[in-house]
Amino acid sequence: MPCTGIGPAMLRYFTTTLCRIALPFALALGSSSAQSDPAHGIAMYGDPALPPDFVSLPQAYPDAPKGGNLTMAVNGSFDTLNPFITNGSPVEGVSALTFETLMARSFDEPFALYGLLAESVTTDDARSFVEFTLREGARFSDGSPVTVEDVLWSYETLGTVGHPRYLGAWKKIATATATGPRTVRFTFNVEDRELPLILGLRPILKKADFAGKDFEATTLDKLTGSGPYVVDQVDPGVSITYKRNPDWWGKDLAVNKGQWNFDTIRYEYFANPVAVFEAVKTGAITAYREDNLAKWASRYDFPAIASGDMIKLEVPHDRPSGIIGFVMNTRKPIFADWRVREAMIEMFNFDFVNQTITGGAAPRITSYFSNSPFAMTPGVAPEGPVLALLERFKADLLPGTLEGYALPASDGTPQNRAGLRRALALLEEAGWTVGDDGVLKNAEGAPFAFDILLTIGQDEAASIAAIYVEALKDIGVQATVTMLDSAQMKTRTDSFDFDMTYIIRTMSLSPGNEQNLYWSSEAADTEGSRNWMGVKSPAIDATIAAMLAARSQEDAATAAKALDQLLTAGRYVVPFWFADRNLIVHRKELKQPATVQLYGDWGNSYLPALWWYEE
């Protein structure tokens, strides 16, 4: 079948590597391999696209010059240089710039890794184990070798006292042993075909850095990594500057060619977006990501743009939309009933809010995996393998899961009377009625009241919340908005101490173990997890398990579509819109490759990794 319905970067990837064999959803497998021998790379399905003798990643410009400086902006503050723990607010960039992993990801493929600290990876057809062999020349920035002891200590420490995001994979490891002076093997106690890749992406820390220290304590001490940069200057809570390490051990590896080119990378912290934009206009911030299409169209006309000293860049991508919006905490009794959650979605007049905030330019999020081959079809009942997977849990599924579910549409007016009437009917079914005083109350007379928790600096979310709160008044709901600094916000969300808050959960083209952290029943009871909605669903747990056990892209897509159906019909989030392209304004001296990778501007993998400075 032809590879249609996909963007240019994805089309380029599938045309050159995957479209040799047709499969549903315009995805295909490369040749399969038992991979019992050491290999230069590993992919989630089939083989990685690049051969053992590749000279650079296809998205990189291998001859990019080194030099120059990059300054970027961050809202908020920081109080720790250790990003691997729950405590504190970690500084931007420290993990990506100063630490390395055994394998490196190519963001021009859905999910493929190539050797970085490790020269090779070995696993079996069942992926019941993975073995990594360290490169002989791998070094920390102080010149000391990266050892098997550092690897084993890092995995155990992260998995036992590190951030909860590391716990899930660690619990699936039966044994972790050194099988040679440069070789480490992990055997697994569950079936999870993604685990070899997940473990390949664990950061490797220097064990000696933490001797006699509390790993979980926040610290502004500089940690020793093996990456392309070292921490240079730290102004606590204000700025951090990274300096390129001229003696970086990995600078000549093919997987690093053309990457990490700036001499210095600096992150400046600001209290609010207004101050950020002023710094952008003056050129103090040399690259800035804009996330509002209306602002992109209206306010980027300042003198530096007109003169050509700064350039507007739009970066296409083929990523799923993910979910962005106001998440309801179902641990709170007020949001435990799906009818109440549906009513809250009904009261969000998407067309009006979108027009007000973005000028109507942003596409609506219709499901968690919308804009991708893994998306459910809104309003259409699932069929075939997806239906079969869901029907196992038929008795426990919410209305719309099997029948087809679509987000409610507004009636096109600012008042949205049709949505208001549907919301009131749902709330009445759930036991809430409007009294003579105009207040929505339950049978005990308690008012329907909740708080929307936001971080200072989330100006767009605050503007959306203000419109939403006014709309909710029309049905007697008493909603308030509370703004906290980033440290307070982290404490509240880590302990799930909120009614409703702003959520962003990004999705990849190879969904896997991160889904457990986002929505599993176990994560719902784990403080610090990303399951802010508090969902506990055997169907969701089983669907994630099916995704992790899938041996083909087709089976993985089936599980992903089922998961998308469950999450969307769960009515846990009031969805907003997503960016179908990334927007960057930058100084003219900053250059980027002509070829855009499959994931576009994703994390640090595009900017700053692939960019360079050139007069």
Image: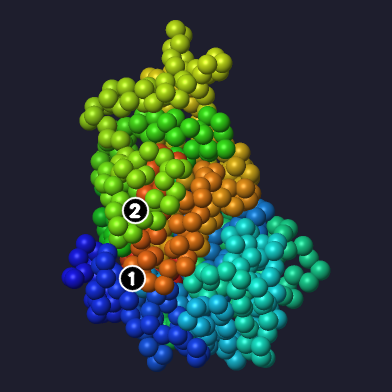
Left or right: 374 as drawn, with respect to 171: left
The residue that mark 2 highlights is: 387
Badge 1 marks a residue whose secondary structure is loop
Residue 432 visible in rendering: yes
The residue that mark 1 highlights is: 597
Above or below for 134 versus 325? below
Which residue of the protein is positioned furthest toward the top in this rendering?
436
Q: What residue is shown at x 36% (from left), y 29% (from top)?
A: 347
Q: Position of residue 525 (x, y in %)?
A: 62, 48
- Give the amino acid type for the residue marked by disc 1 in the picture: Gln
Q: Quadrant of residue 139?
A: bottom right
Above or below for 405 versus 372? above
Q: Quadrant of residue 571?
A: top left
Q: Quadrant of the C terminus?
A: bottom left
Q: What residue is shown at x 54% (from left), y 56% (from top)?
A: 517
The Cα–Cα distance between marks 2 and 1, rounded to whole angstroms, is 34 Å
Which tag, 2 or 1, sits closer to the chain's start? 2
Left or right: 289 as drawn, with respect to 307: right
